[in-house]
Amino acid sequence: RASAQRARSVAVPRTSDHRRRCPLARADEPTRRPGTLRARGAQPRIRTARAAAPCARPRARRRMKAAVMRAVVGLLVLTGASNAADKPHLVMFLVDDLGWYDSPWHNPDLDLPHFAALKTEGVELDRAYAYRFCSPSRSSFLSGRLPFHVNQFNKAGDSIGGGVHVNMTTIADKLRLAGYATHQLGKWHAGQSSPDLVPAARGFDTSLGYLNGQEDHWNQYREACGDATFVDLYATDGPAFGKNGTYGDATFRDAALDVVAAHDASRPLFLYYAPQINHSPLQVPAPYLDRYPCGDANCTTRQTYQAMTAFLDDVLGNVTAAMQTAGLWDDTVFVMSADNGGPSGSDADDANNYPLRGGKYSDFEGGVRVSSVVAGGRVPASMRGAVLVGVDSYVHLVDWYATFCALAGLDAADDDAVDQTGARLPGTDGFDVWPLVSGANATSPRTELPLTLGPHQPGGSNGALIVGNYKLLLGTQLPAIVPGRTYPNGTAPGPLSLDCGDDGCLFDVIEDPTETTDLAASRPDVLSTIRARFDELSKTAYQTPYLDGQMNCTDDPRVVEMMDRGFWTPWTDRHAPPF
């Protein structure tokens, strides 16, 4: 990155170090009665454990598969069989709820120099797609399965299962087999009820983040069993005692800088960094609000959202500069992607997807077409600054599983994965898109984009599939708004929803990217063909099993222990039976 760009980085003061804390409760550890409430706005409770106390081993039972994998990884590292020099460092920077018009290459009025530099020095994926909301997108990338083959639900903390099936091989599992050091930071949201679902059991050497979908940015509170001051902050093997009470993405940034500084450049690095920004609640350090002055109540939501993005821009600058200083950047493939479209017209209603229609939760382009850039020193100089557009440039978030595997010299297949009954689980779905990104190929191997098929969380959409130029939409699409450039601004654009019914709507998303002209009546042949493909694919749908509302807050000893400690942790060894 040019020195002029580095000079623009705002160095946010770093928080405390991120050494691993003792994972289990002890007699000298602060405790409290379950159900204790703290008034909103009160000073957050910082929970600590005495450093002198002996650390006990976690009680989680590790799967045999994980134990074997660790042994194999250790052997690879000791023998040098990983051929690290041939493998790039890999970073997935998965931004939460980033609107289409909230990135600087779509909105030039935004002051986001590091995002802009990433695009200038990398390759913009103008036709990148993800699921229409959080957990399915993350489950898709981690498992290598399209969402309808792994998970299409956001599950609460009191649910058993969900997310990525425990027997699916994650991208971190794969990369460890190639000798990679693997680290996870920020939002997880891919399973948390049992010890074998958290990051350390899914292939990550270290982790620091929150297990579920959202929390307070300042104190990391997420309600549990009626306690509104319960903390969701987890560090590898247990609660991150003493680390709550700081702005979340400052904590995760500092952990990322520690990972980079401590990494041995001779070994390949995989960093999965999923920031909390821009997910609600809208909270940001006050100085960032000054970058986007606001004169009335109609712009405060937009001001705060854009200020949060500015904070994240500085985080991005800090991390990329650290990788350069550590001598990693020249051998890095750095992927920045949103996990879904921005919330616009429903839910938080704080982002802007202009000129795309709809937002998070719907299968309109505003909900599933995401801002994405690939940068790093491994991007060929001839491709830097390129924009991949059109029907030949489709990329789904799931494709980064196969692409990372290919870059690491691995087979992306996971054909031996079975459920508890021995029934075979869906295999991986992704394509290696590095030939497209690197310029070796002019077309993407992906020609269709299954968006929502089979069992899924109610609301937002009842089904969607893109084949070539055309998108099929089924059921009520919510939101369906058409925003303006300055949204949100106190107005209520419409229509809020569009009912495509059981017969479906049909849009040409290449020629009509704002999805204003329904072609269902004029192109019944295309509608019929895509609907037949939709029905065919739907027969293969799979949902990782879950059971809702299973946490017994008063009689389950594991849950009572968790409540006494004040931090979310895995609270059962049970798994949901197959559906």
Image (tube, helix red, strand yellow):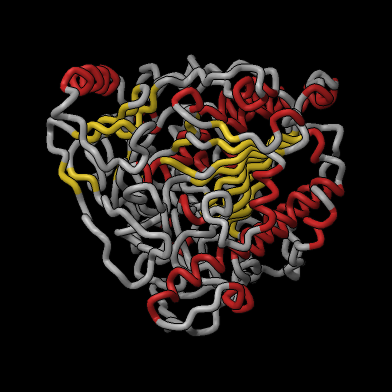
Say above or below: 402 vs 359: above
Res 276 quadrant in image: bottom right
User: Along the line of sight, which residue is nearer the eye, 2 or 405?
Assistant: 2
Q: Quadrant of the C terminus?
A: top left
Q: Nearer the viewer, residue 369 or 228?
A: 369
- How many dots with numbers? 0
* Left or right for 147, reference 333: left
Above-or-below relation of 8 to 523: below
Q: Is residue 233 above or below residue 457?
A: below
Residue 487 in view of the camera: yes
Q: Is residue 434 above or below residue 477?
A: above
Q: In the displayed structure, does residue 207 sit left or right of residue 533?
A: right
Task: Locate residue 361, reporting x and y percent.
Answer: 32, 48
Q: Could you tell whether 22 is left or right of 427 in the image?
A: right
Instruction: Please give the name of the residue rendered at 44% of the width and 76% of the height, measured from the top-left corner.
Output: 300
Residue 225: percent from left, percent from top? 36, 65
Residue name at image x 55 percent, y 41 percent: 372
Residue 555, visible in the rendered structure: no
The answer to whether 283 appears left or right of 74 in the picture is: left
